[in-house]
Amino acid sequence: MVTTKEPALRFTEALVRLAHLVQQVFGEVSREHDLTPQQAQLLCLLIDGPVGMTELTRALHLEKSSLTGLVDRAEKRGLVVRTRDSRDRRACRIELSQDGARIAVLAHEGVTRRLDALTEELPEQHRALLTSAIGDLLAEHTSRTGRDWLPSGHVTDAAPVTR
Amino acid sequence: MVTTKEPALRFTEALVRLAHLVQQVFGEVSREHDLTPQQAQLLCLLIDGPVGMTELTRALHLEKSSLTGLVDRAEKRGLVVRTRDSRDRRACRIELSQDGARIAVLAHEGVTRRLDALTEELPEQHRALLTSAIGDLLAEHTSRTGRDWLPSGHVTDAAPVTR
DNA sequence: GAAATTAGTTCGTACTATGAACAATTGTCA
DNA sequence: TGACAATTGTTCATAGTACGAACTAATTTC
């Protein structure tokens, strides 16, 4: 018998639904800019500068063959450019095109705005708490599964809620 | 210039990464049972009993044609059965097969176990807080966008953190 | 400098997601 | 009652996602 009585279940249920919501927001924003969610995610990852394919596979948790396809399509749409790496002639760096950069920023802002809007009713304190609690959760997962590539100094440097 | 200095950005960054993590967990568990994440999600939604197609499109945020395909493939795999609705001869109800029910429970448990594991280090208090804060967030979104189909009494009846 | 490793691509397969057009059924209301 | 509208779900064509196996080219290792 599977019912939803234990707090444990409640908790994961909350997480799953939250994830679903974030995905939804991402999807809406992507569509507004005529992107797929995956393309939008790619663009957002490139905002801080060019990134190599291997790094991207780690960041997106994709197999390299999947990423090749994603980048191919993004390139065909003129959102992104493949640049040959000068040091390692096997490697390449993926870079936003001018168009891509514009859209990337818009999409990023769109997601941020919508998600922020959802919490504007929450007291700032809870918001901060939520952030660092999630930070803890992510840190826990990272320490458990080993490395998890990060584009730059984000989330994880928020002070953990524990200790 | 897009940097990550404002707490606002930190917060959405946390949400997005959390969503990503949940998706990942879902993906791992699904794979263990030789399912796609979408199939696993479908099965989990059916645990509490048969559901009609229209209801499912709302729960999964899919177009009806997309759902037809998803159910088709799940049915072909013997995970699910289409039952004709006796009252409305246009409609049908999707029901777990015996095999499907077994796998659905396993997958559900798998996700629950893994997500719970991530928070076992957190003090129970924070965990509860996280849950209800997320509950608030979801409620905010629901009230904003109107209806959001729920399979049964979940999350939302957790006491809101605000007020 | 041969062998192992690493970076990316190609290819075949299965799955995901959508919109438009459609058939069947049910509901409305004049 | 009987035409018309709305609802339920399917089919089809199209584009995109994701994977693993096999592959090429460049780099490291020994």
Image (cartoon, coloured by chain):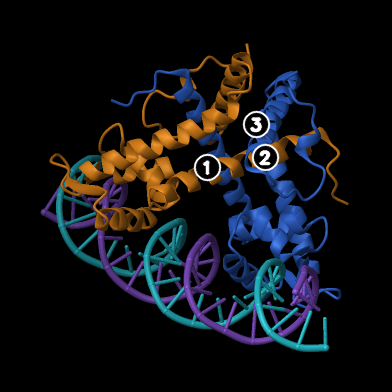
Chain colours: A orange, B blue, C purple, D cyan
Q: Chain under label 1?
A: A
Q: Tell me residue B66's x, y (percent).
A: 57, 66
Q: Nearer the viewer, residue A116 or C15?
A: A116
Mark 3 vs mark 1, CA separation in Å: 13 Å
**Which chain is mark 3 on?**
B
In the figure, A57 relative to D3: above or below?
Answer: above
> Identity of the amino acid at label 1?
Val
Question: Label 3: which residue?
Answer: B137
B29 relative to A119, above or below? below
The image quadrant where one finds the N terminus of chain B is top left
| Amino acid at dot 2 | Thr
- On residue A25, the disc is 1
Residue at horizontal 86 percent and vertical 73 percent from the top: B87
Query: Residue beneath label 2, please?
Result: B142
Quadrant of residue D21 within the rendered picture = bottom left
The chain holding disc 2 is B
Where residue A121 appears, x then y in whole percent?
62, 23
Q: Find the residue positioned furthest to the top.
A: A163
Categorize mark 2 by other alpha carbons within 10 Å: few (<14), some (14-19), many (20+): some
Residue at the spot x=21%, y=49% of the render?
A82
